[in-house]
Image (cartoon, helix red, strand yellow):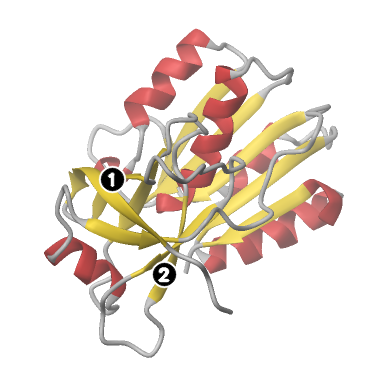
């Protein structure tokens, strides 16, 4: 599929840890850039590969200022992220498509929301959560179950914890799969967490984003719990 790309500018790069960076990118003033929380963009990178575009979910909520954020994990075996790590600098021009994808919130949030993610899969879910609170969209309970290996991998931790203080109906639940000395939170994988949260099988919307293995298992478990496709949306990150 052929995409139309605009010349955008990298306005900021922030190192989260050795494997994750935040990229802030701005569309030119002559272009009106709109997106729905949950959508992604394609970056067309100057790399010597058969396919030069890469898709990344937008991590920021719509702001109306043509600026958006991507949170990207390094794949040393690939070509796209090594280019961004080694070559991309603040002030550089980068080719970006319009917003794409249909991973989005329901028109009306009638039931509890359960966001389930691993790693940088938190990106589109963060966009959704912040959009709900920024625009005071009517909602019920919201859960963000975020699976990672290590404490250092928990993305947006401080921000999510602050949101949970400000909005008591929002719970941020990080889950770590490796032994982290001093960690008193949830251990293991994300699945037992949402199964316990929804053990009463009440109606809910489930949004999954992350590693394919997690998505496959979560979809299977949620189906066994009685939640059909209508209430389970997913986006793969492999």
In this rendered view, identify the residue nearer to me: 233 or 63. 63
Which residue was labeled with disc 1?
22
Q: In this view, does 35 lie to the left or right of 21?
A: right
In this rendered view, identify the residue nearer to me: 179 or 32. 32
Q: Residue at x 78, y 28 (%)?
A: 109
| Residue 126 vertical position relative to residue 43 in the rendered view, above or below | above
In this rendered view, identify the residue nearer to me: 211 or 129. 129
The percent position of residue 146, horizontal first and vertical second, equals 47, 42
**Residue 135 visible in the picture:** yes
Q: Which of marks 2 and 1 is nearer the N terminus?
A: 1
Q: Quadrant of the N terminus?
A: bottom right
**Number of numbered discs overlaid on the protein picture:** 2
Could you tell me how far apart the alpha carbons at marks 2 and 1 are, in whole angstroms?
A: 16 Å
Q: Which mark is residue 224?
A: none
Which residue was labeled with disc 2?
54
Q: Are marks 2 and 1 in contact (CB under 8 Å)?
A: no
Q: Residue at x 61, y 18 (%)?
A: 135
Q: Is mark 1 on a helix, strand or loop?
A: strand
- Quadrant in which residue 224 is drawn: bottom right
Q: Residue at x 83, y 27 (%)?
A: 110
């Amino acid at each position: 599929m052929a995409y139309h790309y605009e010349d955008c500018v990298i306005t900021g790069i922030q190192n989260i840890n050795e494997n994750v960076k935040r990229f802030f990118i701005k569309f030119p003033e002559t272009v009106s850039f709109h997106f729905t929380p949950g959508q992604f963009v394609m970056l067309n990178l100057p790399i010597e590969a058969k396919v030069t575009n890469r898709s990344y979910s937008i991590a920021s909520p719509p702001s109306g200022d043509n600026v958006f954020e991507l949170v990207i994990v390094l794949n040393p075996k690939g070509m796209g992220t090594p280019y961004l790590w080694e070559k991309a600098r603040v002030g550089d021009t980068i080719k970006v498509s319009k917003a794409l994808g249909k991973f989005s919130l329901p028109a009306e949030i009638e039931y509890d929301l359960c966001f389930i993610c691993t790693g940088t899969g938190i990106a589109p879910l963060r966009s959704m959560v912040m959009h709900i609170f920024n625009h005071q969209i009517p909602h019920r309970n919201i859960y963000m179950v975020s699976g990672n290996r290590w404490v250092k991998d928990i993305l947006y931790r401080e921000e999510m914890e602050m949101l949970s203080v400000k909005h008591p109906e929002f719970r941020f639940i990080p889950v770590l799969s490796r032994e982290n000395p001093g960690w008193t939170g949830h251990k293991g994988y994300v699945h037992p967490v949402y199964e316990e949260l929804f053990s009463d099988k009440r109606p809910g919307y489930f949004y999954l984003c992350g590693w394919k293995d997690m998505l496959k298992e979560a979809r299977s478990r949620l189906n066994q719990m009685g939640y059909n496709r209508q209430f389970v949306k997913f986006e793969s990150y492999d």
